[in-house]
Amino acid sequence: MPARPPFTSYVDTVLAALARDPGRPAVTTADGEIVTAGALHTAVHRMAAVLAAHGTGRGQTVALLSRNRPEALAARYAANLLGARVVLLYDGTAAEALAPVAESADTALLLVDPDLHDTARALLDGFTGPRPQVMTLGPLPAGTVPLGPDLPAACAALPATPTVAGAARPEDDWCIRHTGGTTGIPKGVRMTHASFAAMLAHATLEDAGDPPRLLACTSLAHLAGIMADLTFVAGGTVVLHRGFDPAAVLAAVARERITHLWLLPPLLYRLLDDPTLPTTDLGSLTRITYGGCTASAPRMRQAAEVFGPVLYGWYGQSEAMSITEAGPADHADIRPDAPMTVGRPLPGVTLAVRDPEGRDLPPGESGEVHVHSAGAMRGYWKRPDLTAQVLHDGWVRTGDVGYLDTDGRLYLVDRLKDVVIVVGGHVHPAELEDLLHTHPAIAHAAVYGVRTPDETEEVHLALVPAPGHRADDLTLPALRTYITTHKGTLYAPAAVHLLDAIPLTPVGKPDKKLLRSLPRPTP
């Protein structure tokens, strides 16, 4: 019987791409420094050697707390090369929330951005059991109490660059990605090397540039990190920003000749509203990929008009990776009064829309979206009970409500858990948000349910007034009239919160948990 070929992990694929042209720029840091592909390739192997000497290997968990810096990319690749799983901790999340996530994943090693040393100390103080080893991704500020060895310094001290063989096996977890969980510890989604390697080996980003130049202006711990992997494999360059600032993003697109942006919809809206947009040279930009939360049809119609045929909408979730894509043709004539499609299934993905009994529904009928693909999760970390609820015979129950049209395009109605149950029926927040985004006095809207003392739910609106409009234009009586005229009394809001900006989670989604904690406005 012929021997199986050795497993090629996603890290092997990235490293091979870096080695093909070592002199090309691979990363431009937030401070403008250029890291070549060869230097990044070397950093990964040196980090892997140092981590292995400290005991990191298959079956262990490495937690990574970092902002957008090249060392964070190299450290993730190094840990995964050794077969360790990675937990990516979001900068901007409170240490009190990060500690149980890191501890529950059996973190053996915590890698820390030196800029986040205070957060790391507070995180470690939150452990109830043994603390993990700690290494930093650079020197700490002068006078700061050490946290652990400086990983890049240890790498620089090696007499030569070793070649570290990949130890990951197909069934190993490459990461545990935590998602959901409004109370308690978020669910840990286990993603295998086999599924991610297959995705990276076959994925192509149409119109991302040749070679692509990606601006990573959202956290590398989220999808910007996956986009970076795809960019390296395609022979491109990743330009890092520390965070999202619309004016800075637009300036970088022009200055760095960016071809590809990844954004969550609320961040794309902020670009549309930025006063520097009309005078920015966007000629290099050939692709804007967006996703991560529901997009507003009126605002995406505006985006298509402003940016042109460069919009690619991705629908996916951690439990199933990428599911569908909507291309420029799907954005050519978006109706602001109807749901917009999230596109057709990506290659290797099978969709079904099913009723509560598991029966497939015909086109046009709404039900829960089920997904079958090689990208399906292995299960939830240490939660076989939750795994059994979501994963059945390779099918992932997404918890999303949607329907298919006769051409196989998927339309999402809402999340099952985001439905607001009011007296008389159900309110779908995304549907009401689409209506509010057609109101001339509203720049951005978030709709959510708030439970009352008597355990009923009511609809609340968080609104950002459009430029030139005042609070007087968005009173509760006026908005109730507007909404009931277009949607009926079922959708009438009980409260309106006027804000300077919609608060976002660390990954860029509207933070509805925080919004629910706002005090009820005075009538």
Image (tube, grey):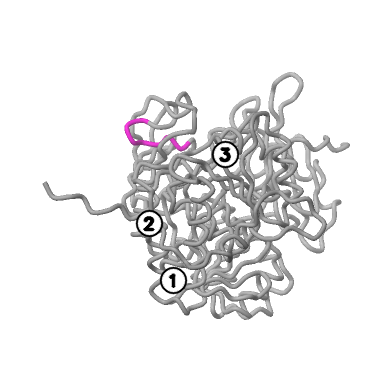
Q: Which of pointers 2 and 1 lies earlier in the amino acid sequence?
A: 2
Left or right of 141: which side holds 30?
left
Q: Identify the image quadrant of residue 59.
A: top left
- Provide the secondary structure element on which disc 2 rests: loop
Identity, as a three-letter code, of the amino acid under mark 1: Asp
Q: Which residue is painted at 54% across and 69% down in the image?
A: 238
Proximity of marks 2 and 3: CB atoms separated by less than 8 Å: no
**Position in image of residue 20 (x %, y %):** 38, 74
> Real-space Cα distance between discs 2 and 1?
34 Å
Q: Which residue is mark 2?
A: 165
In the picture as drawn, the residue positioned furthest to the top comes out as 454
Farthest residue toward the left?
1
Amino acid at circle 2? Ala
Distance in Å between CA atoms under marks 2 and 3: 23 Å
Q: Could you say where residue 115 lies in the image, as x and y percent from the top left?
A: 73, 57
Q: Residue at x 40, y 44 (%)?
A: 192
Note whether 170 is above or below 289 in the view shown.
above
- SS for tag 3? strand
Q: Residue 303's x, y, as percent?
A: 59, 65
Q: Which residue is mark 1?
A: 207
Instruction: Determine which residue is flagged by label 3.
Output: 107
Q: Nearer the viewer, residue 417 or 292?
A: 292
Q: Which residues are magenta?
A: 392-398
Say which of 52 and 408 sits in front: 52
Q: In the image shown, does 370 or 219 lie closer to the viewer?
A: 219
Residue 317 seen in the figure:
no
Which of the two discs, 2 and 3, labels the residue nearer the N terminus? 3
Q: Residue drawn at (40%, 56%), measured in percent from left and top? A: 10
